[in-house]
Amino acid sequence: MTPKLHASTAMALTAVAFVAFPVTAWAQSNAPTAPADQQDNGEIVVTAQKRSENLQSVPVAVSVLSGAALAQTARPSIESAAQLVPALNFLKSGTTLNQTIFLRGVGTATFSIAGEPSVSTVVDGVVYARSGEAFSDLVDVAQMEVLRGPQGTLFGKNASAGVVNITTQMPKFEWGGTAEASYFDRNEFRLKGSVNIPLAQDLAARVTGFYGTYDGNIWNTAANNWVNGYKHWGVRGQILYEPSDDLRIYATADYHKNRDNCCAEIIGANVSASSLINSVLPTPQGADSRQIAQNLVTRTEEEGWGLSLQADMALGTNTVTSITSYRRWNNTEIRDGDFLPQAYVGFNQLHDTGPQKSTTFSQEIRLTSPAKQFISYVVGAYYSNATSRRIFTRNVLSCTAVAGAPTTVLIPCGSALANPTTSNTGTADFGSEFNNIAVFGQGTMNVSDSLRLIAGLRYTHDSLSVFEDRVSQAAGPGINASFLGFNTSTSSDNLSGKAAIQYDLSRDIMTYASYARGYKGPAYNVFFNLTGTGTNVIAPETSDAYEIGLKNTLFGGKLTLNIAGFYAKYYNFQANNPDLAAGVVVTRFTNAGKVSTRGVEVDFSLRPIRDLSLNGGVAYTDAHVDAFFQPTPTTPVIPSGTPLAYAPKWKGSLSADYRWRTGGPVDLYLGAQGNFQSSQLSIFSPTLSDRVFGTIAPYGLVNLSAGIGDSADKYRLTFQVRNLFDKSYIAAVQTGGPSGGLRYQIPRDADRYWGVTGRVNF
């Protein structure tokens, strides 16, 4: 009988008031979650501190992307946003379950169902328990804020490296909408549209839908078709009710369904030259490889939906905010784990199927004071329950050669030269349940018109229960049948916080210095081929982070120039590392040791004339291992000083947009965007050769666009070319291919392609 997860106990949420200090000097509104937006006067409003504020008055390093900037990317998503935000990096994997966000070089890459991300993803105030839920299309987005560095005081335990805070377009109290259609070469189509519906004087609705399909950029020679494509569709409905200045109710429901035949793992290099398997593999060409030969298409089938309700209510001069959310996410991974067209003697066929079902309920309540008073504050409480269950099956086919068979040819299983094929199947049923309860507060003491003191605290209680049960355990290659399963739990309490000082050198120049204590909760290493080491609890990860910053608004607001310097040290860093279990050295997801990151970031936005804007940024990041735990004196571990994975030392982006007002009925629109990054480590391994071959070479990309539209901006037709100079690059490298071959991920943007988009506003 399958062990059951512990039932969650209903918890009463209590807002605890205490003196704390957030920034509010130039706040735009008391409403803590009013939609972030670009204001008519050029100011950018963000909600990085749970209230609406001018970006230039917030003592936090924040990168801001508009919805329009995201819409111009290859596919509006967090993956595409990584090309625009220098501190943000993205690990592409075979399924969204295993993809990872990194900020300032720090992230958590694990196959465990009981591990959590280091970068929190928040959509319209709702925290997504699993970052993979947010890797779908970002449609009808108003703004994306990337908060760099630990943000746990206000955003919780999964924000130890930062937060990606997304706000969507809100319903408006007037009829209108947009419709958009795009075509890109290699059969990529996209449709999306939104409509505002005024239902009453104080009641409005907004409905958004999207559809997209793409054949892919990798040719599968075994099946004679393209892979790495997708078919996505979804819908979102929103209702906004504002009967008075004292009450605002916002409800939303969304649904999406994705079918991705992605991401094919190319055997790109390092296969032994003498290996017989070379006769059936496409010729390895490194970053130029665009072929696979696999009889099972690696793909992800995903379905998700969610409901949320937010209420903002006046309580005297304060505002009470309640956000209630329920989300369900189903994700099925189907994977060709042998990367070959069939089974051969010495090369087994390994096919995996792993459907996972996840649910999350969360409740947040906050009390926000007015911004302009001697002590202003945000205090609140948060509760979430997140459950996941996966039933993972591995099917293995293997065979041996008949007596006297030649050893110089590759022998297919099922042929006359092979003995009868052996089939082995293993199935594991495993899951996790996270319960998180927290109370928090942050506020500011306005000592003078120029000086503000900031402080905040968050108390967190985590409980985690996990189980695994071997439903089927036929021993064979790739199937561990020695471990029958387990059921266990753990809990943790933590007090984290933030302290900062903020000073206005002048009306247009602000400087700040801050300290933050970060926290990420306990974990277990629970996956299909689990051994007894999975029962060992992985202790919480903590960090100490320091940041100084300078924010400049110059030339009457035409130029903003923001500079941040940072240093953060992480303890009990959760990563794969050799460990000692029952006297045996094993490599597993564990508390690997200490890492640190330091660097400098520069962001700027220049609008020298009304219709020309330049935006860009550059980041220097030195993120590396300080000291990893060595279970025995002779056990190789990742050496001190080794760069962390997906942490290029240099990364930058630059974009320019110009509208030429002709004075006639048609205006012209021109745009250019470029990004670059230095080399980065992809294979985070104790083995030197893995790190050498698993390093992604530096690259840069240039994208251009040109469009025409009417002067009232009701119609626009845009043509764009992405990767103008046709620069091939690799998104991710892994070991484990046949005969020692490396496995590559090649994204859509690694080739030059063109597209055209038509948009109608009504």
Image (cartoon, helix red, strand yellow):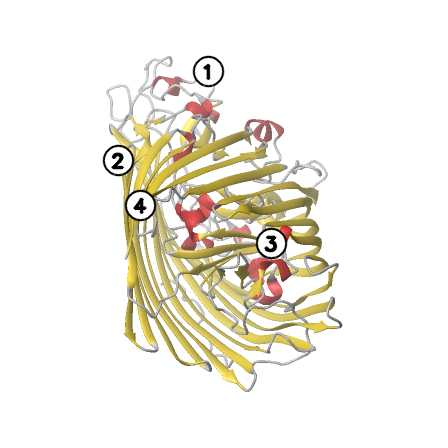
Mark 1, secondary structure of its residue: loop
Residue designated by label 2:
187
Q: Nearer the viewer, mark 4 or mark 1?
A: 4
Q: Nearer the viewer, mark 3 or mark 1?
A: 3
Residue 727, image x and y in percent?
Answer: 46, 26
Q: CA distance from mark 1 to mark 2?
A: 36 Å
Specify the quadrant of the image occupied by residue 268.
top left
Instruction: Decide which of tag 3 and tag 1 comes sooner along the chain.
Output: 1
Residue 313, image x and y in percent?
Answer: 47, 81
Residue 675, image x and y in percent?
Answer: 52, 36
Residue designated by label 1:
273
Q: Which mark is residue 557?
A: 3
Q: Nearer the viewer, mark 4 or mark 3?
A: 4
Instruction: Decide which of tag 4 and tag 3 comes sooner along the chain.
Output: 3
- 64 left or right of 175 in image: right
In the rendered structure, which amino acid carries the disc numbered 4?
Answer: Pro
As drawn, 558 above or below 224: below
Mark 4, secondary structure of its residue: loop
Residue designated by label 4:
665
Q: CA distance from mark 3 to mark 2?
A: 43 Å
**Residue 234 seen in render:** no
Q: Residues within 10 Å of mark 1 (few under 14, many from 20)?
A: few
In the rendered structure, which amino acid carries the disc numbered 3?
Answer: Gly
As drawn, 14 above or below 650: below
Mark 3, secondary structure of its residue: helix
Q: Nearer the viewer, mark 1 or mark 2?
A: 2
In the rendered structure, which amino acid carries the disc numbered 2?
Answer: Asn
Q: CA distance from mark 3 to mark 1?
A: 61 Å
